[in-house]
Amino acid sequence: MAAAVSTSQDTAEPAPPALALGAFDFVAYLDAARLRVEAALDGSLGPERPQSLRKAMRYSLLAGGKRLRPILCLAAFELAGGEGDLALPTAVALEMIHTMSLIHDDLPAMDNDDLRRGRPTNHKMFGEANAILAGDALLTRAFEMVALRSPGVSAERLLQVVGELSLASGAPGLVGGQVVDLESEGKSVDLETLEYIHLHKTGALLRACVISGALVAGADATLQAALHTYARGIGLAFQIIDDILDVTASSDVLGKTAGKDLTADKTTYPKLLGLEESRRRADGLVAEAKAALEPWRDRAAPLLALADYITSRDR
Ligand code: GRG
């Protein structure tokens, strides 16, 4: 099993030495990446009008969260040889899409949740119509970030990124996964259907994160193929851990309602396989993901550590 990894977001204590993975200090990396992402997110919204819309967009976009998706994008960009801030607008766009999906997922017509990232959900604060529109505005703003606000990146690469984000957001990704998830509520689904839901609802956007970061840096086909394998492994493992945490963690720690899957009578990995086998499967998927990046071993340290973080996280 992966070593437990905490961050200075979890505790003010200095990181114990075990958290420095070899010569690579993951805690310092994660903290620096988070600061960079938070600053970029803070400056990402223009003078959206009306102010009420801007407020609802900012409320969810700046509500914290692990910022895993933009960090994966930046780490893949660097692995592919990228330098500087060229991938930052794409990283912000990915967090905007993710935030939109959380706002919509929490709506009464979907998961109907009151708590997200430790705060009342967007529709609880601003009403249902405004929450839908804030999500819509974040989704479209994401494409604007890539197409119009990514100076220094060639039009050809940006077009490829737009393609990846489209695939991840629409029917072949988030929307398709969400539809099958909703249709499966109250039914017992098999492992294949559960995997379909997770690969689309969660995995597609995680894949877009690493692939689009790599595309901005001009990654070749070999690296892109390895990143596909990496993303599939971490995407499924991420969701298995999400299912486990839904049963084992508290709402306080999660910042969202714990036990939701049971209440909604959802099929989950722990329900199909049991907790122990689910954890074993997540560990196996992370091992597969890491093995795909073996040829880039030295430069892949952040992505390798992020894969371990996914299975050792507590929220
Ligand atoms: C309208 C285009 C469009 C899409 C919306 C609602 C929807 C379709 C899809 C639902 C997608 C969804 C909410 C998947 C769950 C993914 C997941 C496990 C989220 C939790 O991610 P974390 O743990 O959250 O990274 P933080 O808060 O840390 O960012």
Image (cartoon, rainbow, N blue to C red):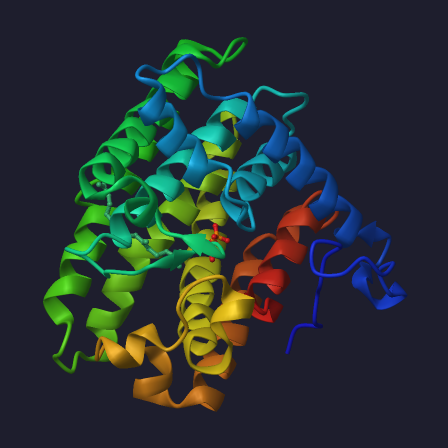
When asked about the image quadrant of residue 1, the answer is bottom right
In percent of the image, x 45 and y 20: which residue is there? 45
Residue 91 located left or right of residue 99: right
Which quarter of the rendered picture does the C terminus lie within? bottom right
Tell me the residue at 42%/40% (across/down): 60
Camera sees residue 140: yes
Q: Residue at x 45, y 13 (%)?
A: 149
For the residue pair 210 and 19, the one nearer the viewer reads as 19
Give how far across and how far down residue 217 sits, in percent: 55, 25
Q: Which of 294/69 is in front?
A: 69
Of residues 124 and 304, which is closer to you in this image?
Answer: 124
Left or right: residue 42 versus residue 298 is left
Question: Residue 41: x and y, percent?
Answer: 53, 29
Image-based side of 245 in relation to 24, left or right: left
Identified at 49% across, 41% down, the residue is 210
Figure quadrant of residue 49: top left
Residue 42 percent across, percent down from the top left: 55, 27
Whether 302 is drawn above or below 32: the answer is below
